Image (cartoon, rainbow, N blue to C red):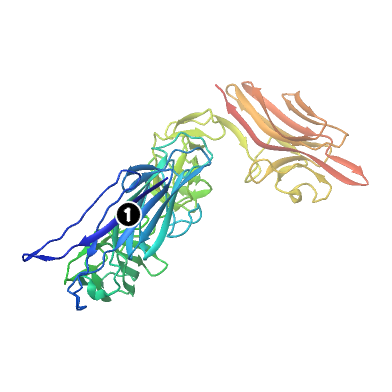
Amino acid sequence: MKKSFVLIAALMAALFAGLILSGCETKVEDNNTETGKQGDNTDNDNMDGSNTGGNDTATATMTWTGSWIRVSDTTYRSAPIGNSANTIERLDIAATGAGTVTIQITASSENYRDYGYASKLDTGVSTSGYQMSVTGTLVATHTYTIPKGAHWIQFMYQKDSYDYTTSGSDSVTVEIIASSFTSSNDNPDAHDMAKLKVQNQSSVTLADVKWGSTAVSASLTPSESQTVDVAVGSGYLYFTKGGADGLECRTQEVIAVSKDETKELTLTNNTLVVALDDTNNPQALGTIEARVTQLTLSNQSFTELTEVIWNNVSFANNTVENSVKTGTTVTNTVSAGSGYIFFKRKANPVTARTKDLVIIAELESKTFTFDDKTEIVEVNNPDNTGTLGALQSTVVFWDDAEGELQSYYESASFVGYYKTGSDLLYNSSYNYYNPPKNGQKSIAVGGTTTAKLHLKVTLSKAAKLSFWYANKYRSNGETTFSINGTTQRTWTTDVNWSKVEFDLAKGENDLVWEKTDGYYYYYNNNYYYLTLDDILIYYTE
């Protein structure tokens, strides 16, 4: 399907009974073609070849192609699509003179999952090649410089494969919010002309300075100015803050220039400008910076929080204790995504995480505040939930094999934490063991015929025991686990990593892991290991 409209600007000048008549016509045709006309001055050449003012009319015919939904003459919204799909609309521009077209693209989609894109001029759009990108509720605006001739822009809405509840209208909307085309006559004397003087009184260098599509200066250093001849009209002043590789910006306000005027525009550190990828957020020229994705954690709770991590990014303002002190904030640049915030509560210790996921979109700045009412979950017992100020740990014992070896009632060689075979009883090519299960290390029991790990724990009420285990077996002896002298498990085969749970009664409990088949000689010394991880005991009452 194709939908088109023509923009033609005309000022008709004629002498009739001493009057000057001028006009502007706009017409919309309701046959899938939208036509509008606006333009510049019209040339009035005398028969002797002299020019009495005015210039040639410039036109731009714009044609939409695709399946998107027409909202208005200049606005289209992406059509509904399924997961892992995209939809593309194309805008063709046939211009008889140079000009500019300003496009605004608005998202109404799921943050960081579904995206809208606008291509560069005359370049196919893709998820890795584009002029603008939006997601969530972001809005982006860009003014395309359109040379004389035929050109095109593509727009795409891309959905991911996840079937989550959609946000907003699950679409992107594209709107032509401004357009301006100069005369097709290449003679500058034929235009209504004026002058524009741009003075840089800020503290930063401005590169690629343009007023609309008219070049002002390749570079304006602080205290430098530049005056250029311009055709009358209005537009933003565009520039790159900090040099060619800096932040692309424009003025917040439109700059209008009248016929025969010398318009002076002074830019200071306090001049309000917007970044081209964030046009709804005006900031002072002196302080505006490129947007980044960042997370700020504010600790307004009663206690210091240690080992605070979101998506593998650590947060700390007390580097000695790796903690976030109460009454302080920490900000880090992060990658867009979702995850829980993990931490340890220093007062009334507990290892916990936030109850809800913290979701951050691309280029979003989010603040998460911890206070005494923040809902949290105990990491080692996810069924234990409550507030940061009140949650009581139910964990009696926890060994994840990280850090220093925990204190057990008894251990007979060999017992130890390991990461590789070099951490076992002998650094041998005849070590038989399973790689660590969770984290960097696991617990090894074996390498001899007398290896034993004995944990004695006294419980004030009923509890539950869980642990991960894996076993390597050679055929002589066995591997067992017992509670209070009663064998609960016997392993006489190789076993890959598995998890098991047991109920523990109130009172004293002896938990014993033994391996009597940890050594065997057959042409060489062979060593076999029972491996354990995440040994956890927690109250269930």
Question: Quick check: 111 above or below 488?
Answer: below
Q: Which residue is mark 1?
A: 279
Q: What kind of residue is marked 1? A: Thr
Classify residue 246 as left or right of residue 8: right
Q: Which quadrant of the structure image shows residue 409?
A: top right
Tell me, yes or no, if residue 353 can be seen here: yes
Percent across and percent down for residue 292 are: 42, 54
Q: Residue at x 67, y 32 (%)?
A: 467
Q: Residue at x 44, y 55 (%)?
A: 119
Q: Residue furthest front?
A: 47
Q: Residue at x 61, y 35 (%)?
A: 398
Percent across and percent down for residue 88 are: 46, 47
Q: Quadrant of the N terminus?
A: top left
Percent across and percent down for residue 381 are: 56, 31
In front: 477, or 338? 338
Classify residue 61 as left or right of residue 270: right
Percent across and percent down for residue 199 are: 25, 72
Q: Which quadrant of the structure image shows residue 493?
A: top right
